[in-house]
Image (tube, rainbow, N blue to C red):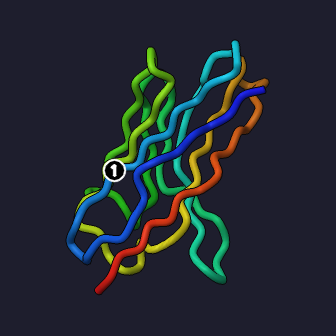
Amino acid sequence: QGQLVESGGGLVQAGGSLRLSCTSSGTIFSIHSMGWYRQAPGKQRELVADITARGITNYADSVKGRFTISIDNPKNTAYLQMYSLKPEDTAVYYCNAKIGNYPLVNDYWGQGTQVTVSS
């Protein structure tokens, strides 16, 4: 059974930076893509950024130019580098991996990591 382990959340002042990591393990199937979603209190979970194993990226408009997603395929690890953080970036960030042979993929989720940006 695959699992995702996240790290790197925390408390930072506005304008600061953080890097989130997410490692996939426990599955023999290939990763199609990995990504990050976030959910703020009282709001729906939203896509922040995702990246395919081939390196094709997609970003929410609200983070373009500030966040960078990358993937290390041999390590089955994705990174989300966040710069110029704003209070509105405060949320629980969840790692997602789509594993399998596209389009027959299964979704896996991390446990979530809190990112808090103080003004």
Q: In terms of secondary structure, where does tag 1 sit?
A: strand
Q: Quadrant of the C terminus?
A: bottom left
Instruction: Name the residue that disc number 1 marks.
Output: 19
Q: Residue at x 70, y 19 (%)?
A: 27
Q: Residue at x 37, y 35 (%)?
A: 70
Q: Is residue 79 left or right of residue 43?
A: left
Q: Residue at x 45, y 45 (%)?
A: 58
Badge 1 amino acid: Arg
Q: Nearer the viewer, residue 108 or 5?
A: 5
In the rendered image, residue 118, in percent from the top left (x then y), is placed at 33, 82
Q: Residue at x 50, y 65 (%)?
A: 114
In the rendered image, residue 68, in percent from the top left (x then y), is placed at 32, 47
In the rendered image, residue 81, in percent from the top left (x then y), is placed at 31, 49
Q: Which image quadrant for residue 117?
A: bottom left
Q: Residue furthest bottom?
A: 119
Classify 10 Å Cα crowding around label 1: few (below 14), some (14-19), many (20 and above).
Answer: some
